[in-house]
């Protein structure tokens, strides 16, 4: 069964948007399984098709203790009767945390490795070692980012909102694959990526997916404007996420919430022109709320509570 999604648009309302005469449209792909949603549906689509066509034994991938990608890969494998292996960063990781327990419920075999070993996840000798240990498994990179993933995201039409053409496409950026896909899928609409990790190599990683023999739309990558370190957030950012619950919009403060907060800061600072119509891709990651609650970083897994 190939992954399917049900793309939805939501127009956000906020005094800042009204004051600056700005439209902000959020697009989300909830999927037919909530554990495979947002950008993960698009990033895994062609990799899963490849695994099925090649009659792979399973999927092998990498992630941290609370990785959205590990959950989505485990769920996608289970739905298609494939085995799955997750290489988890850190020998001390608790396999009973909500994220990894969910992965195991889908049948994923979790292998805890040292951080030194994990840093070699792109090295050919490490990949060969894992390939020998798990023959016939399709290797999916950390975060799912690869050419097939970028192609999947590029097929998402973010340029045409229900009210008309967007002035700018926006998303949170972790590994770079999603924003690269938005750039490739846009004819002329500018794209803004908001990095929620501190990775100086991100621009280079994004450009690697953009062929040099054609003109791409204007694109820009900026660092998140509040709590820029990965996984860090404060009560101000969490309360911002909670403030959209009345509009039936659920946010987490690691990816989408942090990026959306930055958009509002740009609007207030006049760095996004009045009269703009913004198209923002909600990349999912809502399972991570349970992990935040598990660590005592938020009071509950559901922002509506």
Image (cartoon, helix red, strand yellow):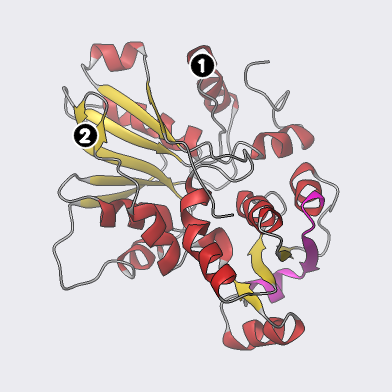
In the picture provided, is 38 more to the left or to the right than 162?
right
Whether residue 268 is visible, yes or no, is: no
Q: How many marks?
A: 2
**Quadrant in which the C terminus appears:** top right
In the picture provided, is 31 more to the left or to the right than 268?
right
Residue 8 lies, with reference to residue 116, above or below; the image says above
Measured as percent of width and height from the top left, residue 49 is found at 52, 65
- The picture quadrant where one finds residue 297 is top right
In the picture provided, is 163 more to the left or to the right than 48?
left
Measured as percent of width and height from the top left, residue 290 is found at 72, 35
Dot 1 alpha-carbon crowd within 10 angstroms: few under 14, some 14 to 19, many 20 or more: some
Residue range highlighted in magenta: 105-119
**Quadrant in which the N terminus appears:** bottom right
* 39 falls in the magenta region: no
Residue 166: mark in rendering: 2
Residue 85 lies, with reference to residue 265, above or below; the image says below
Whether residue 263 is visible, yes or no, is: yes
Measured as percent of width and height from the top left, residue 105 is found at 81, 49
SS at mark 1 in the image: loop
Residue 243: mark in rendering: 1
For the point 49% across and 32% down, which residue is it? 257
Residue 13: mark in rendering: none
Measured as percent of width and height from the top left, residue 234 is found at 59, 30
For the point 19% across and 35% down, which residue is it? 167
């Amino acid at each position: 069964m190939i992954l399917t999604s049900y793309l939805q648009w939501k127009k956000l309302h906020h005094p800042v948007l009204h004051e600056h005469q700005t439209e902000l449209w959020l697009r989300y792909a909830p999927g037919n399984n909530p554990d495979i949603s947002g950008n993960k549906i698009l990033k895994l689509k062609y990799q899963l098709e490849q695994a099925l066509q090649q009659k792979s034994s399973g999927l092998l991938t990498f992630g941290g203790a609370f990785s959205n990608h590990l959950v989505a890969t485990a769920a996608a494998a289970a739905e298609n009767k494939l085995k799955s292996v997750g290489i988890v960063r850190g020998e001390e990781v608790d396999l009973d945390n909500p994220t990894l327990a969910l992965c195991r419920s889908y049948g994923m075999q979790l292998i805890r490795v040292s951080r030194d070993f994990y840093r070699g996840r792109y090295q050919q000798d490490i990949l060969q070692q894992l390939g020998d240990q798990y023959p016939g498994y399709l290797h999916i990179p950390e975060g799912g980012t690869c050419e097939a993933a970028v192609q999947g995201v590029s097929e998402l039409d973010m340029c045409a909102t229900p009210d008309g053409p967007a002035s700018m496409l926006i998303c949170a950026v972790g590994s770079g694959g999603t924003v690269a896909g938005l750039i490739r899928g846009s004819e002329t609409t500018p794209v803004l990526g908001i990095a929620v990790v501190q990775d100086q190599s991100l621009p280079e990683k994004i450009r690697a997916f953009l062929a040099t023999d054609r003109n791409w739309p204007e694109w820009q990558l900026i660092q998140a404007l509040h709590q820029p370190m990965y996984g860090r957030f404060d009560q101000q950012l969490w309360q911002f996420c909670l403030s959209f619950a009345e509009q039936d919009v659920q946010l987490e403060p690691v990816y989408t919430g942090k990026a959306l907060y930055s958009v509002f800061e740009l609007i207030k600072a006049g760095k996004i022109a009045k009269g703009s119509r913004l198209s923002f891709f909600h990349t999912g990651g809502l399972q991570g709320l349970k992990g935040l609650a598990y660590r005592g970083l938020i009071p509950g897994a559901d922002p509506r509570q």
